[in-house]
Image (tube, rainbow, N blue to C red):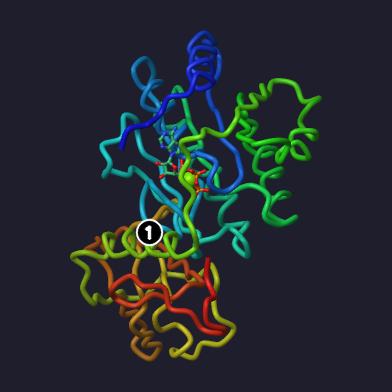
Amino acid sequence: MTIRVERSWQALLARLQDDRQWRSIIVLGPVDSGKTTLCRYLGRELAKSHRTAAIDCDPGQSVLGPPAALGLAWEPWDGKRVSALRFVGSTTPSGHLLQTLTGVKRLVDRASEDGAQRIVLDSSGYGSTGALREFHYQTLDLLEPDYLVALQQADELEPLLGSFARRVDLEVCRLPISQAVVGRDPTERRAYRHRKFRQYFEGAAVRTLSLDGVGFHGMVPATDSPERFRTRLVALCDRRGFVVVMGIIEGLRLDEGCLELYAPPFAASQVASVQLGSIRLDRDGRELYYGPPGGGR
Ligand SMILES: Nc1ncnc2c1ncn2[C@@H]1O[C@H](COP(=O)(O)OP(=O)(O)OP(=O)(O)O)[C@@H](O)[C@H]1O
Ligand SMILES: [Mg+2]
């Protein structure tokens, strides 16, 4: 796919290249505003002169890693290798704001520890609900990025930007949405997530994890009825809370103290906890919905 590099993008890049002091930039905008494409462009260009990390904060139309997780990769990205994942447990931040916020923060810290000189953060669509708008405010407040890029047609992000107008050490750059953006409807979005999940579960098999010394967290069902766990998406997390592997629960055998899951190969010795997600998948990576038809995003 050929990217149309807008003049406004070139001007932004030139400004970033002139500034020697900064560390992180976040791109915000409504759904289908070209956020991911701009981040890919900036990441690739910045990596020519600095060690540059890309962080994908969108658990829905994820690019770096599978959906329901947030990913960290190094630029220039080879299209495959993701260096760390944090599990959200759903394909939208709604209802999972804490997991998303903590995940983003931990990925930024990890990128910094691993020597990132520049960090480019992609985000999930701004503005669909009041709770999500507040979530974006809190994310900015916590991360304190040096640059905030606001992609907007008119003034969609102004309510948020107004809250940062008097902040020091934050440079706000308003950019128009590129004419080259191609919108995606809910069916295309679902099909994209299905492809990404299917790709992730290539090479998966049913595997057993001993639960000895391993705790559950995340969206833990109120009951310990094994049936409530079946088909749930889970992540096995390492000692620092990053994903070792994601899997689909096949069975919970409490009497034997083990969890059966459909997952790619993993090293059980790395697993420190099990984070439950709220979505359910079949083995082909298709999202299973309970409730009214047409649910899902
Ligand atoms: N400058 C551009 N040149 C060519 N194609 C573009 C450009 N910007 C966006 N697109 C295309 O438009 C589509 C949507 O863009 P993109 O995924 O970057 O938007 P987004 O805001 O990240 O969307 P989402 O809200 O789903 O995360 C993609 O298929 C992308 O290839
Ligand atoms: Mg995107």
Residue 30 location in percent, x, y? 61, 45
Callout 1: few (<14), some (14-19), or many (20+) C-alpha neighbours within 10 Å? some
* Residue at 46% across, 50% down: 70
Relative depth, front residue between 65 and 260:
65
In the image, taking residue 147 as reference, residue 254 lies left or right, namely left
Q: Quadrant of residue 204?
A: bottom left
* Residue at 48% across, 69% down: 277
Position of 22 relative to 283 (above/below):
above
* Residue at 65% across, 43% down: 139
Residue 229 location in percent, x, y? 45, 82
Q: Which residue is mark 1?
A: 192
Mark 1: secondary structure: helix
* Residue at 41% across, 69% down: 234
Relative depth, front residue between 7 and 113:
7
Residue 122 location in percent, x, y? 50, 40
Q: Quadrant of residue 164?
A: top right
Placement of the N terminus among the 4 image quadrants:
top left
In the image, taking residue 11 as reference, residue 62 lies left or right, namely left
Position of 269 relative to 228 (above/below):
above
* Ligand 1 in which quarter: top left
